[in-house]
Amino acid sequence: MGVKLLLDKANVPGIRTYEVYRREGGYRAVEKALKEMTTDAIVEEVKKSGLRGRGGAGFPTGMKWSFIAKPDGVPRHLVCNADESEPGTFKDRYLMEFLPHLLIEGLIVSSYALGSNDTYIYIRGEYAWITDILEQAIEEAKAAGWLGKNILGTGFDCNIHVQRGGGAYICGEETALIESLEGKRGNPRIKPPFPAIQGLWMRPTVVNNVETLAAVVPIINMGGEEYAKIGVGKSTGTKLISACGNINKPGVYEIDMTITVEEFIYSDEYCGGMKDGKKLKACIPGGSSVPILPANLLLTTAKGEPRYMNYESLSDGGFATGSMLGSGGFIVLDEDQCIVKNTYTLARFYRHESCGQCSPCREGTGWMEKILQKIETGKGEMSDIDLLWDIQRKIEGNTICPLGDAASWPVAAAIRHFRDEFEWHVKNPELAQTSNFGLQHYADPIHVPA
Ligand SMILES: Cc1cc2nc3c(=O)[nH]c(=O)nc-3n(C[C@H](O)[C@H](O)[C@H](O)COP(=O)(O)O)c2cc1C
Ligand code: SF4
């Protein structure tokens, strides 16, 4: 069994309640941080831990915290990003649903370190039942003296407010989130200024993912150096992976980032192998935005080395032969799945979610969707594949926020690794429209490792 730092108590009956969470050692990190540590010492500990943001980009958390501006008399804010709308990603939901006090504890310690007296959880609107769970946990923590005024007699005041999201994927982008939290339409802001300087109500703000903030609890309890010993390289600590698709055991798993992708997919401790004994065809390893990898490049790098479930290994080879750990949304596709259909589905999603502020994203996502629909329904021409490639190239890097990149990467990777499948659709228009296309085509094991 791998190391568990976040989900170790997830199966304790009643752990959702304050009483049981406290009995199991909960809120020790708050006691330690507020009574024994300075705010700078907490930031230092988080830096030493090597913790990287679990929201997708993997930016070092301690460094982000140290950027927050501290102008005299201006309130600062911590915002917890619980919007979780990336297809394939459902780890924060699990954490909040079953261990709400772990998040509250991480939020109190982090709020103290950053000097946030009013901290916000911006939660995906559809997670209505989890909003109730969090609000109940906040009430319990307040009643026990962990929130409110003068916590533990330290003079530190902290309130946590839960805000349900506006129902759009773009509201997970940190500046769109801030706009939405301010009551406006969730349109991303142009950066700079970065939130650490001018964020919520133009005050210095740190936005962190749910899992990132929960990880602060074990870091404070065990110390940053000990935390950094778990994992490998710059992939320290543990990572939650939400696994779905054609596997035997979809679910949320905590891994210590030293296991191979092969072990993650095939061992009984994690995904339990491919469903119905089918062959592995491809995988989107870090949420829908990251490049899809064919099975051979997923299990081994282009150098022929085993691929591991961590930041460095999954991105080995760049986008030419690698992908990203991203948010940890691990989507597994078997031999029956059609890459063109899959890419079309994702393109529809990104077109729908584009906020429309910048032309390359607003127009480009729509064009990509239309061309993919054409190819998928057997009306495509060979030149459409090059056109699709050209459009995605013109979106990437030319937009206000990374949603444009997120929309272009899946299309680029699908063409890069599965161009033959796109061509097959063009050459076989009648078959392209049949629902069992994948089955017929992937009798040819071209993308399946020996
Ligand atoms: C379109 C889009 C959607 C995003 N959705 C989320 C989300 O649901 N949750 C999240 O934590 N980060 C999301 N992010 C990343 C955030 O902008 C931000 O980088 C993250 O919350 C920072 O937290 P971290 O440093 O703890 O990872 C999204 C980014 C983009 C561009
Ligand atoms: S990239 Fe897309 S989602 Fe982001 S600001 Fe531009 S139009 Fe909006």
Image (tube, rainbow, N blue to C red):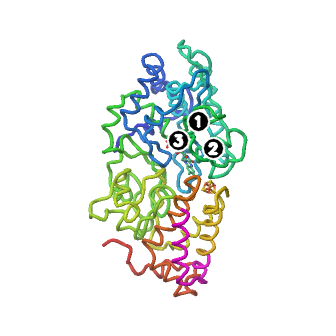
Say which amino acid is labelled 1. Val
* Dot placed on the residue nearer the N-terminal end, 2 or 3: 2
Q: Which residues are magenta?
A: 373-395
Say which amino acid is labelled 2. Leu
Say which amino acid is labelled 3. Asn
**Residue topped by disc 3:** 209
Q: Name the spot of residue 391 as percent of width and height, x first.
A: 56, 70
* Dot placed on the residue nearer the N-terminal end, 2 or 1: 1
* Dot placed on the residue nearer the N-terminal end, 3 or 1: 1
Q: Is residue 325 above or below residue 156?
A: below
**Residue topped by disc 1:** 79
Front one among 278 and 179: 179
Q: How far apart are labels 2 and 1 at the CA level? A: 9 Å
Q: How far apart are labels 2 and 3 at the CA level? A: 12 Å
Q: Callout 1: helix, strand or loop?
A: strand
**Residue topped by disc 2:** 177
Q: Is residue 275 above or below residue 286?
A: below
Q: Name the spot of residue 112 as percent of width and height, x first.
A: 52, 24
Front one among 238 and 371: 371
Reply yes or no: does residue 382 show up in magenta.
Answer: yes
